Each structure stands twice: as structure tokens, then as C-alpha cells.
């Protein structure tokens, strides 16, 4: 298990281009595909497949910092790795997208952290 943690740690340091190359090499080496399989419910159901693809990434939008703006600023700093001034500007600029292109689990986690601090948040 410790070996897996080391691998995950190393992979997290890679750039997007390096990750893309890594995926290609793994696909070639093991003869697999990283593409998610699409289950066909019906032959004429192309619209549903497109809709499912669109919802694979989410944007987290801060609608309002709420009455506890300092707590929201702290949550933004912690979750996004921002400096104090950057987080304050972001909180003051609401409504504003704070992070784009997140998977559903990460987007919900960020939303929960910001809501716990008193902010109004929406996933788009």
C-alpha cells in the first residue's frame, strides 16, 4: 500500500502533458483504454450520451460570500491554495466561478467546504 502512495505522489507532480503521455504508455503497455465505456440504451439516444459527456466536469461558482466573509476567505485560501489578497478579491467578486473543470466529487467537496464557511455556492 505504501508503494501505491508513492506512485500517486509522483503522478500528482506531473504536468497535464506528462499525464497524457503516461496514459498513452499505460494503454500501449497493457492493451487497455482509459476512455469510459458508453452504454447504449437505444440506437436513437445520441442526445443523452452528449449530455452525459457535458456533465463530466463542473465549475464551482461562488454566488455570495454570506455574512461570514472571513471564514469564506479562509476556506478559499485553504481549498485553492490562494494568498490572502487573492482569496479576498475572489470573495468580493461574487458571483464568480472560483474553479473550473472539476470532477463531480471534487466539485461537491469544494462546494461543501465553502457552504460550511457560510457561502452560497452553485455547481454548473
Image (spheres, rainbow, N blue to C red):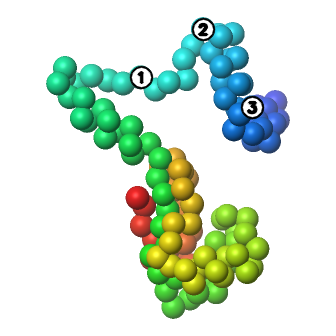
Q: Secondary structure at mark 1?
A: loop
Left/right placement of residue 123 relative to residue 110 reads: left
Residue 52 coordinates in the image, percent (x, y): 34, 38
Image: 69 above or below 29: below
Residue 90 coordinates in the image, percent (x, y): 61, 76
The extreme bottom residue here reads 67
Count of all numbered marks drawn on residues in the image: 3
Left/right placement of residue 13 relative to residue 40 reads: right
Between the C-alphas of marks 1 and 3, the distance is 24 Å
Residue 120 coordinates in the image, percent (x, y): 45, 76
Give the crowd class for mark 3: few <14, some 14-19, many >=20 residues within 10 Å: few
Q: Which residue is mark 1?
A: 37
- Quarter of the figure that contains the N terminus: top right
Nearest the viewer among 61 and 79 is 61
Task: Evaluate if marks 1 and 3 touch, with contact meaning CB atoms under 8 Å apart.
Answer: no
Q: Secondary structure at mark 3?
A: helix
Kindly tell me whether residue 107 is visible in this rendering: yes
Q: What mark, if any, has residue 18 been given in the picture? A: 3
The quadrant in which residue 3 appears is: top right
Q: Which residue is mark 2?
A: 31
Amino acid at each position: 500500500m505504501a508503494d501505491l502512495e508513492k506512485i500517486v505522489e509522483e503522478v500528482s507532480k506531473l504536468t497535464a502533458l506528462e499525464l497524457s503521455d503516461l496514459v498513452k504508455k499505460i494503454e500501449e503497455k497493457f492493451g487497455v483504454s482509459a476512455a469510459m465505456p458508453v452504454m447504449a440504451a437505444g440506437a436513437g439516444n445520441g442526445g443523452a450520451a452528449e449530455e452525459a459527456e457535458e456533465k463530466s466536469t463542473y465549475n464551482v461558482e461562488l454566488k455570495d460570500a454570506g455574512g461570514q466573509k472571513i471564514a469564506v476567505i479562509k476556506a478559499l485560501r485553504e481549498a485553492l491554495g490562494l494568498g490572502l489578497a487573492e482569496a479576498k478579491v475572489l470573495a468580493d467578486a461574487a458571483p464568480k466561478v472560483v474553479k473550473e473543470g472539476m470532477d463531480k466529487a471534487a466539485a461537491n467537496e469544494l462546494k461543501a467546504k465553502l457552504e460550511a464557511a457560510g457561502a452560497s455556492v452553485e455547481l454548473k
